[in-house]
Image: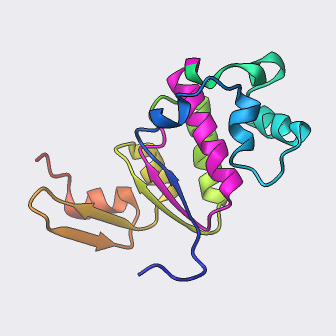
Amino acid sequence: KIGSTVKIAYYEKNHDKYFLEKVNLIDWLKQFSNVKEDSFIRGFLGRMLFSGEETLKMVNVLSGGEKVRCMLSKIMLEKGNVLLLDEPTDHLDIESITSLNEGLKRYNSAVIISTFDQEIIESVCNRLVEIRYDGSHSDKSISYSEYIEKFGLDEN
């Protein structure tokens, strides 16, 4: 049951539906922000490595990595206190993955991540829920390396 003070910010693995319109990055991100001034949005995009003329790029022509950075911007503007992330490192380069890991380590609220990325699991997660094909699961407050050491890796 979700509590009344919970605000979920969700990163969908398939987020193509957000990028169908022919609008620029500034106008696209404004729709998710309480602050509508261009200077605020440009500053925010700059932190996500979009600068100068790139902020006027149309969202329907963005690369996979650019779309991920836009979706992460959207999530940050939503200011959720619970993050649901479905494969957040797909399409990101190593530098962006490292930045995401560092940001998630500093995030002081709940993060639920569905991923195959062992680096993000090891660096960010302190509790693992393994859901198996047969519907069974295990829930352990343990690091990934400790989990592998104690329980091994099921190849199925």
**x, y percentage for residue 43?**
85, 37
Q: Is residue 135 left or right of residue 101?
A: left
Q: Give the image quarter of residue 139.
A: bottom left
Q: Give the image quarter of residue 80.
A: bottom right
Whether residue 68 appears in magenta in the rendering, the answer is yes
Q: Report the magenta residues as a range.
A: 61-89
Q: Is residue 69 left or right of residue 2?
A: right
Residue 93 visible in this rendered orientation of the protein: no
**x, y percentage for residue 69?**
61, 35
Vertical placement of 29 versus 129: above or below?
Answer: above
Q: Give the image quarter of residue 28.
A: top right
Q: Is residue 118 left or right of residue 9?
A: left
Q: Give me the residue at 41% from left, 42% from top.
A: 13
Residue 69 visible in this rendered orientation of the protein: yes
Q: Is residue 101 left or right of residue 76?
A: left
Whether residue 116 appears in magenta in the rendering, the answer is no
**x, y percentage for residue 91?**
48, 28
Q: Give me the residue at 83% from left, 51% from top.
A: 35
